[in-house]
Amino acid sequence: MKVKALHRGILRIVFSTALSCAVSVGTAHSTPSTQIWIPSTDIQPYKTFHLNLDTFIRSGKESPGNLTGAVPGQNLPPVYVFGPTAGVSPFEKIHAEVGFDLIYGGANTGFGLDKYPVYGHFKIGMPEDNTWIPAIAVGMYNIGTKSGDARKGELATNQDIAYGLVAKNLPVVGRLSAGGYIGNKKVLVTDQVDASGKFKSDEKGVLLSWDRTVSEISDKLWLGVDYMGGKNLNGAFSFGASWAFAKNVSVIFGYDIWNNKKVAGENTFTVQVDINFP
């Protein structure tokens, strides 16, 4: 079982002098314990500390008509996510973690979002037992510090995504997780506009994942696949592998396929370094 601090995403809508618009996206999440992209039911143990350093690199050049702020034919710069997560619950059956991340780069820099780099997250849940009872977790992430209404072109980072998940390990198959999320409808929008010219909200969706330690090869090897629904900047299908280079250090190598490339930009390669203390 992998424990990692999560997910990623910053957004601003800007209206041009013409009757067109653009959506600037910084692909990254503030990161609770995750799979590749979505949250997981894993939670940092009490009095443990986790440090994550995540990088997202574009796999291609942005196409004409993109709303990311990038010049067509050019790549968006990488996005970097750095932050701690700590386990804070002393109870055996109820676990909890809190943390924050600093998110820099990509389209964020040009649109001024790097002025508001802090994003918080928290999670509480119950671990899976050896009966039929699954693991359960609820939490929030991408709790930004800049409020605004992106539907009207205002700068905003407070996506404030709340989620719930259940997960169960199955023999041979691995762990299956399912749940859903809902965020701030003023910030999570699509590239579509309504009759008044405002961007339409798309603030909720499903969360699905499969992951497994491939002990047949090595206990150090972990594989994961996850999906986040929605046509907002966070919706994606992601997959990857992790290798434990030491007892407390692992690195994920993954790939993100965005549901709506007009707002999220081109697909990304991701490298995520996770360090646990003690």
Image: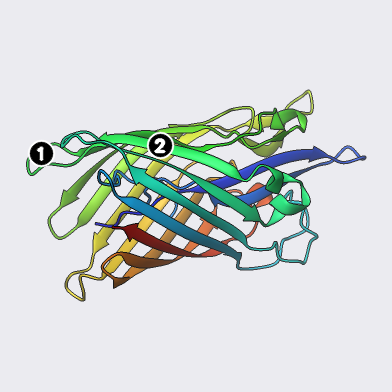
In which quadrant will I find the C terminus?
A: bottom left
Judging depth in this view, the residue of 52 and 237 nearest the camera is: 52
Residue 164 visible: no
Picture coordinates of residue 225, whole percent (x, y): 37, 57
Q: How many marks?
A: 2
On screen, residue 171 versus residue 53, left or right, reads left
Residue drawn 7% across and 40% down?
131
Hey, which quadrant is residue 239 in on the image? bottom left
Residue farthest to the bottom, as pictured: 217
Q: Nearer the viewer, mark 1 or mark 2?
A: 2
Residue drawn 48% across and 42% down?
229
Q: Amino acid at mark 2?
A: Phe
Q: Secondary structure at mark 2?
A: strand
Residue 225 visible: yes
Judging depth in this view, the residue of 19 and 132 nearest the camera is: 132
Picture coordinates of residue 249, whole percent (x, y): 34, 66
Residue matched to label 1: 132
Picture coordinates of residue 181, whole percent (x, y): 44, 34
Q: Is residue 277 above or below residue 249?
A: above
Residue farthest to the left, as pictured: 131
Residue matched to label 2: 122
Residue farthest to the right, as pictured: 17
